[in-house]
């Protein structure tokens, strides 16, 4: 009941939440530091440390920081304002590295309305980028739905929206120039600033478009924008009977199409979303409800309920709550309004700057954590895994049908996904970026329960989620989202990129001493070691694929067994005879 009172409170009021904490914490000034992502835990739950953090406010200061660290031979990693990447991209090796925060590199550098270009520093958030473009009556055509990401963060991980149209939905494919600060030689003063573009230096440019932070620090980025336009949005819920067929073709019919799939309920919410002229009447606003402020106490109660359901095996209760949540969100149109205040009916028409992204829980005053973003680690709130994998469009129908086959075996198995709003499915297409998407695909974004206190605690229907994950990666050749996922998603992933070797050659040229590389980046790039961590219980947290029972939780009845639909999978299954 408290959770639903919180929903009503947040929907009908404009509570502002406590702002997110700085991801970097230091013991003394800016030295002896630790860094964490915005969710409070990396996939392996390790603590990442650094000797100090630097907060340059200008490019000149950034150049000085990189030069000094290069001269000293110190490892460097970039940390963004909110540090939203789930994997350990922000971590340096050991305790002696330097963190370079782009928190204060958040300025507009120049505008050119005639050329429809906008140049900003890499610490500018997506929200700022959208607003600055709108001042010029211009728009970024595609972007992620959460506006708390920074320009540098999006470039580092290949962040995207949803579209097969134009150049596709990846932000980096609407970039024309990148200014990169990298280590230099002694004669260069230990630092080199490069201006990269497709015309002048296409190899370096296509490597830098999805950089993983291993080429240096992105200082500035120039975007090619489009004249402001409006969008017409309708959400429509249907049975998922023919979803496999629809998913393959729907993206060609609607420019901003996506889906929220509720597999245990047999439902799909179709996003019918198209471009309309700027002079069409409408002042709609996309203010996604799950990204709004929530009462911290109510979020904590909701989390406690889910933990009790997990420990007691109450899958039925999870399914009942999931259905109620799905109905509530659909009734309130997921927070979309016709005029910024209330929803009066479809279609909702609004300008691109008001319809593409949101993140109201960042609009914050300090209120002692009375309200917060629901995943804020300072409260006992949401704590989850995110598996985000791009399945080639040619395999999508079969992948969807395999998931439906799993649901048919046990209809309650995926209710946990629906408590996290369902499976978000977005369209992506091929990119010239060396580590961008290889072909037209659908990105399946699955968010699900993770134990906050005990990594050796299995989840309800652990084996179903593991089988879906392995099915996508191994059977259907899916690519991982670089900024999400558990360790196993990156195992061997680099071999799926046809331009991986070209990327590594650029990396060697720009940072021959490997000062921006770490053990983690070497692992995901296939250079040294492996991202999987084989130990007791490793499969429970996605650190490995089980090959023996000890990788699961045999003391709790979870053994390593073949998958139910994809028999080649090896998953942690609750054995009934236990």
Image (cartoon, grey):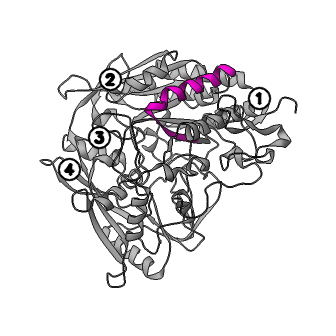
Residue 371 placement (x, y as % from top left): 54, 40
* Sequence-first tag of 3 and 2: 3
Mark-to-mark CA distance, 3 and 1: 46 Å
Q: Is residue 385 left or right of residue 58?
A: right
Label 1: which residue?
313
Q: Nearer the viewer, mark 3 or mark 1?
A: 3
Q: Quadrant of the C terminus?
A: top right
Camera sees residue 321: no
For the residue labelled by badge 4, is the local secondary structure a helix, a strand or a loop? strand
Mark-to-mark CA distance, 4 and 2: 29 Å
Examine the structure image and report whether residue 152 is included in the region drawn in magenta. no
Mark 1, Cα crowd under 10 Å, few <14 / some 14-19 / many 20+, is some
Q: Nearer the viewer, residue 358 or 260?
A: 260
Examine the structure image and report whether residue 402 is included in the region drawn in magenta. yes
Q: Main secondary structure of the magenta part?
A: helix
Camera sees residue 530: yes
Label 4: which residue?
117
Q: Nearer the viewer, mark 4 or mark 2?
A: 2
For the residue labelled by badge 1, is the local secondary structure a helix, a strand or a loop? loop
Whether the residues at callouts 1 and 2 have beta carbons within 8 Å, the answer is: no
Q: Which residues are magenta?
A: 386-409
* Sequence-first tag of 3 and 1: 3
For the residue labelled by badge 2, is the local secondary structure a helix, a strand or a loop? helix
């Amino acid at each position: 009941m408290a959770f639903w009172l919180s929903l009503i409170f947040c929907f009908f009021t404009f509570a502002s939440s406590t702002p997110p904490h700085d991801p970097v914490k230091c013991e003394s000034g800016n030295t002896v530091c630790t860094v964490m992502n915005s969710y409070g835990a990396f996939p392996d739950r390790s603590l990442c440390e650094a000797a100090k953090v630097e907060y340059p406010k200008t490019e000149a200061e950034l150049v000085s920081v990189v030069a000094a660290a290069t001269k000293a031979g110190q490892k460097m990693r970039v940390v963004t304002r909110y540090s939203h990447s789930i994997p350990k991209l922000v971590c340096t090796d050991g305790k002696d590295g330097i963190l370079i925060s782009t928190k204060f590199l958040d300025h507009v550098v120049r505008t050119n309305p005639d050329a429809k270009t906008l140049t900003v520093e890499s610490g500018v958030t997506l929200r700022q980028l959208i607003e600055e473009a709108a001042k010029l009556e211009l728009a970024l055509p595609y972007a992620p739905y959460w506006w708390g990401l920074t320009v540098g963060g999006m470039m580092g991980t290949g962040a995207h929206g949803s579209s097969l149209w134009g150049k596709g939905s990846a932000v980096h494919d609407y970039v024309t120039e990148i200014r990169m600060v990298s280590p230099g030689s002694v004669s260069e003063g230990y630092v080199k600033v490069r201006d990269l573009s497709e015309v002048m230096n296409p190899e370096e440019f296509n490597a830098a478009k999805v950089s993983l932070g291993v080429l240096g620090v992105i200082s500035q980025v120039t975007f090619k924008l489009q004249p402001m336009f409006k969008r017409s949005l309708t959400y429509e819920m249907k049975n998922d009977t023919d979803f496999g067929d629809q998913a393959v073709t729907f993206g060609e019919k609607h420019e901003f199409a996506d889906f929220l799939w509720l597999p245990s309920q047999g439902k799909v919410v179709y996003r019918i979303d198209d471009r309309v002229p700027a002079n069409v009447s409408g002042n709609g606003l996309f203010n996604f409800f799950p990204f709004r402020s929530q009462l911290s106490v109510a979020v904590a109660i909701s989390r406690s309920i889910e933990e009790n359901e997990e420990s007691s095996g109450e899958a039925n209760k999870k399914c009942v709550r999931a259905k109620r949540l799905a109905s509530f969100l659909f009734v309130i149109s997921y927070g979309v309004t016709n005029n910024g205040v209330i929803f009066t009916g479809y279609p909702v028409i609004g300008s691109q700057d008001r319809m593409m992204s949101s993140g109201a829980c960042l609009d914050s005053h300090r209120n002692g954590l009375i309200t917060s973003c629901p995943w804020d680690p300072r409260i006992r709130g949401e704590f989850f895994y995110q598996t985000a994998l791009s399945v080639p469009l040619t395999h999508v129908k079969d992948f969807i049908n395999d998931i439906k086959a799993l649901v048919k075996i046990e209809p309650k198995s995926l209710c946990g996904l629906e408590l996290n709003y369902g499976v978000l499915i977005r369209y992506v297409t091929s990119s010239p970026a060396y580590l961008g998407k290889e072909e037209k695909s659908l990105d399946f974004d699955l968010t699900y329960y993770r134990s906050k206190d005990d990594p050796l605690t299995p989840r309800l229907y652990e084996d179903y989620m593991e089988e879906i994950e392995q099915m996508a990666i191994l059977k259907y050749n899916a690519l991982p989202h670089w900024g999400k996922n558990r360790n196993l998603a990156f195992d061997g992933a680099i071999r799926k990129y046809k331009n991986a070797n070209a990327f590594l050659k650029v990396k060697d040229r720009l940072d021959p001493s490997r000062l921006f590389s770490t053990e983690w980046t070497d692992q995901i790039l296939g250079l040294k070691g492996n991202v999987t961590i084989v130990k007791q219980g490793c499969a429970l947290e996605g650190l490995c694929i089980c090959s023996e029972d000890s990788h699961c939780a045999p003391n709790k009845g979870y053994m390593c067994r073949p998958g139910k639909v994809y028999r080649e999978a090896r998953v942690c299954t609750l054995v009934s005879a236990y």
